[in-house]
Every structure is written in C-alpha cells, then in structure tokens.
C-alpha cells in the first residue's frame, strides 16, 4: 500500500518533518524549568519508529482484499494510541503495548462491507478510527487478549469518499453494516440483525450525527411509517446539531432515544426526546435493560396516525411548535401549541393516514368554548422555554437567554434566569462584591481522567507539541530524581 510522502508523527501531534531543532527544545525545557522551579537532569529524545518494540501481526488478509490492509510498522503504531496527554507521553517513550494487527483503509461502501465480513469470519475485533484524538482511549486496541486479532478501520477523510464518510460505520463505537435500502422485516432478516448486533463490541468514538443523517436519508415508502432508535451513552459534542436534525425530520420519521451506560448524557437523551416529541429511555445498569425495553415496546406498539399535517385556515396562527408532527401512538399523544391573532374564527384541518386509509378532520374554531383558559398560555410558554433552553445551554445564545427571561417574567415561570425569591432583611454580603468560586465536581461513574481536557480537531503547531512533550519529560525526570534520592 502506497503512503503519502508527508506523514503525521507516529506519536503526538504534528508531522514528521516538523520536529524542532535541539536548541529550540532545550530553550523550551529551560522556560518550563524556570516556570515550575525544579532542575532537569537530561532531555530525552522520542523513541524512533524503528526502535519501537512491536509484536508480530496475528492476521493476514485474503489476497483479494490485501490492497485495503496494511501491517506496516508505521500504520500499526500510528493507530495504537489517541492524542490524550498520557497517550503522547507513552508514544514519546515508545510504549505501544496494544497495537492493532492490521489497519484497513476502505474507499467505498463495498470495501467497508468486505472488511467487516472478513473481521466477522476471523472473529476479529473491528475498531473504527476517525480523527484519532480519542481523549477517552477509545481507539486503543486494549482487547488484544480477548480476540484472536484486532483490525483498526481508518475512516479518515483522506481515505474515504464522501459517500462512505457519511455511512453510520463508527456510530456508538462499532461499525454497522448499512445498505442503500432498509431490509424487509422478515424472520430471517431480524435474526441476521440480532446476530450482527450480538457480534459487535463498543470501542472508539461516537459518530452519532453521521449515523442519524444516513438513517434519515434512507428512502422511505409512502404507505409506511418509519421509526429509528438511537442507543448511545451520549458522549458527544454535537448535541445541538443532533436535536436540530431530529426536529427537522419530525414529519419523515420517529426518533426515539435510549441512553445506556453508567453515566448517560441525560441532557442529550432528554433533548433528543423533546425534539422528537417523545419520552427518554435511560438504562444505567443491566437490570434496567429488560424493563426499559418492555416499556419502549409497549410505548410504540399501537400506532394510530402517520403522515400528519395540520393547516390553519381563516385565522393567523404563529409561534406554532413543533413545526412538524411525528406519528401518533396510542401511548404518545401529540401536543401542538401556538398563538393566534384576531378573532377566533376559521378552522383547523388535520389530515393523515391510518391503517384503513386516509384520515381527515376539520375543527371549527368559532364553535370552540370561548372561555378563558390561562393554563394553555402557560403550557405554551413552558414548551417554548424548554426548546430554547436546550439550545441556549449548548451555544450560549444571548438572544435565547433574553427570550427565556422575558417568557419567565411574563408568564411567572421558574427558569434559568428567573426565580421566585424570599426577601431577607439581613444583609450577608456587606461589601457588595461578587466572588467567583471554582467548584470541583466528581467524574461520572465509569469515566476515567482521560476524558478531562479539550480535544483539538487538527494537528497542533510544532511548538505546542514540543512544549507538551517537554513538560512530560520534565515530569518524568523529576519523578526519576525523587526515586534515586529515595534509594539513597
């Protein structure tokens, strides 16, 4: 397999030709030493690629697929670790204890399918590899002792065309076979799907948005309703985009959100449920799985109306939410809220499709009870605040914050910016000065310290890379000096 002339470093950030000269590294070391206040005995050099101890590959691809795979030293080492701090330090010191046996570079949907079938035949673990940052250690093949072989599938855009890049292959840490059309719900297809899911093992990053896009883009039949179930721990940073996508396709498909894991991102799961006009389902441990699965099956087992359309005739309706309606289930009533201007006259036209054919109903607005219903205004305001709040928390939208505040004040509602207060006559803060306090919080259950910190999206400049390496080396040098002094 041919490789590009300019390669990324097998450890850390940046390219191989971006290594700074020795005098610059020493200058960085002196600056860090002065800053931290301790001396350094020596400055280490990164372990060269050819000097890294690497176990032999345990797997060989068949001849017809050989062009898609690589067992080269660089490819295996470069796909062994992420780019978290501890990964950079281990890579610098040449500590690669769990390399993949093969690295695959698919270039089409057919390539991906062939790779996954090969892994299935060989009982090999398949790990999707995207940008490779992996601050939580997902790309690291730490299951070498549990599988006869490990194959890392490089999904970087340099190796994939746009069609493959949007396939839900790395969704929720495992590659998913995806065709151009949904399969017919036969007993054979259901059993095949179960076998495939049972064979998967989660690892790597969560590419939720790509999976949603591909699923919602699948062709649909006019006489059938579609439902998608999102199953994820929610460790993503694209909550807003995912919620927007679900809301935009309410009339095309039903999306239900399952949060699974010891520390589920409830904000995402509950936000997706609100965007899809449904309920969230949370599974924190294996004992809850069957209970929540049964509840979900009961929740969707009685669909009543699909392809729902609501039109307002003869009066001006505005601020209607949601803009589109998903399917109606017996246990999922749909609430459409909004406001209108002028006199209450005209009609509301509701149309859709039932199991027996087309459905249509006309509601005469002028015939409705004209008495005041203050609770309706409050319900609309609560719904609007919930929607605005999901986005405001994600993008720090000042306009959304102002609208939430205005709604809270107008409708006397408790929000993130309005509250009911009790006035105390005793002044506690006599100076009137505010003080910001950093409150440490525990990590979620089951999450390591590797999740702490920001994730860069592109290779960092060489100075930042070497500063990080220098800091790592200073730490190791200080640790060794303490060990030597302790021995004396």
Image: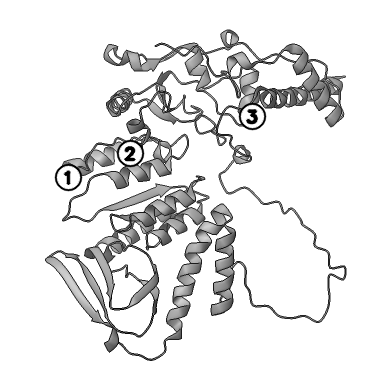
Q: Is residue 277 above or below residue 184?
A: below
Q: Is residue 302 visible?
A: no
Q: Determine whether, in the image, residue 111 is placed left or right of residue 402.
A: left
**Mark 3 and mark 1: Cα distance apart in space:** 47 Å
Q: Earlier in the sequence, mark 3 or mark 2?
A: 3
- Check disc 2 and report the residue beneath it: 198
Badge 1 element: loop
Q: Position of residue 406 (x, y in %)?
A: 57, 72
Residue underneath mark 1: 184
Q: Nearer the viewer, residue 237 or 54?
A: 237
Q: Which mark identifies residue 86?
A: 3
Residue 358 percent coordinates (x, y): 14, 66
> How far across and down, in percent of the image, does residue 234 sit?
48, 48
- Give how far apart the Cα atoms at labels 3 and 2 are: 32 Å
| Image quadrant where one finds the N terminus | top left
Foreground disc of the pair 3, 2: 3
Instruction: Report the front residue among 187 and 374.
Output: 374
The image quadrant of residue 19 is: top right
Q: Is residue 337 above or below residue 472?
A: below
Q: Residues within 10 Å of mark 1 (few under 14, many from 20)?
A: few
Q: Which of 339 and 264 lies nearest the eye of the viewer? A: 339
């Amino acid at each position: 397999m041919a490789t590009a002339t300019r390669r990324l470093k097998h450890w850390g950030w940046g390219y191989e030709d971006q290594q700074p000269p020795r005098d610059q590294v020493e200058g960085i070391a002196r600056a860090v030493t002065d800053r931290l206040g301790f001396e350094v005995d020596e400055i280490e050099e990164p372990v060269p690629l050819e000097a890294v101890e690497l176990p032999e590959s345990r797997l060989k691809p068949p001849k017809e697929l050989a062009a898609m795979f690589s067992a080269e030293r660089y490819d295996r080492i470069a796909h062994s670790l992420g780019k978290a701090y501890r990964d950079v330090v281990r890579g610098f010191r040449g500590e690669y204890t769990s390399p993949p046996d093969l690295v695959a570079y698919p270039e089409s949907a057919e390539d991906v399918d062939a790779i996954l079938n090969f892994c299935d035949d060989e009982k090999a673990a398949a790990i999707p590899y995207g940008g490779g940052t992996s601050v939580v250690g997902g790309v690291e093949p730490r299951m070498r002792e549990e599988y006869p072989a490990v194959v890392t599938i490089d999904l970087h855009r340099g190796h994939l065309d746009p069609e493959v890049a949007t396939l839900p292959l790395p969704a929720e840490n495992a590659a998913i076979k995806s065709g151009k059309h949904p399969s017919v719900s036969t007993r054979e297809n259901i059993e095949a799907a179960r076998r495939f899911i049972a064979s998967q093992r989660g690892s790597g990053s969560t590419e939720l948005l790509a999976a949603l896009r591909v699923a919602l883009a699948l062709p649909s039949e006019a006489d059938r309703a579609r439902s998608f179930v999102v199953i994820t721990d929610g460790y993503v940073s694209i909550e807003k985009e995912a919620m927007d996508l679900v809301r935009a396709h309410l009339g095309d498909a039903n999306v239900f959100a399952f949060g699974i894991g010891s520390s589920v991102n409830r904000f995402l799961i509950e936000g997706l449920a609100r965007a899809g006009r449904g309920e969230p389902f949370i599974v924190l441990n294996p004992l809850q799985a069957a209970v929540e699965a049964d509840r979900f099956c009961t929740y969707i087992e009685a669909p009543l109306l699909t392809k729902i359309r609501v039109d307002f005739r003869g009066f001006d309706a505005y601020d209607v939410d949601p803009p589109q309606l998903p399917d109606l289930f017996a246990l999922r009533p749909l609430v459409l809220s909004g406001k209108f201007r002028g006199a209450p006259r005209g009609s509301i036209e509701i149309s859709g499709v039932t199991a027996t054919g087309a459905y249509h109903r006309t509601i005469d607005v002028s015939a409705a009870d004209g008495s005041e219903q203050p609770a309706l205004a409050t319900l609309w305001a609560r719904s609007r605040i919930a929607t605005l709040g999901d986005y405001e928390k994600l993008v720090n939208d000042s306009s959304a914050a102002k609208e939430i505040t205005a709604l809270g004040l107008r409708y006397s509602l408790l929000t993130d910016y309005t509250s009911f207060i009790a006035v105390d006559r005793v002044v506690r803060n006599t100076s009137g000065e505010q003080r910001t306090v950093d409150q440490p919080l525990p990590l979620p259950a089951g999450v390591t310290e590797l999740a702490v910190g920001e994730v860069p999206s592109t290779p960092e400049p060489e100075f930042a890379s070497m500063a990080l390496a220098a800091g790592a080396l200073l730490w190791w040098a200080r640790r060794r000096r303490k060990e030597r002094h302790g021995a004396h």
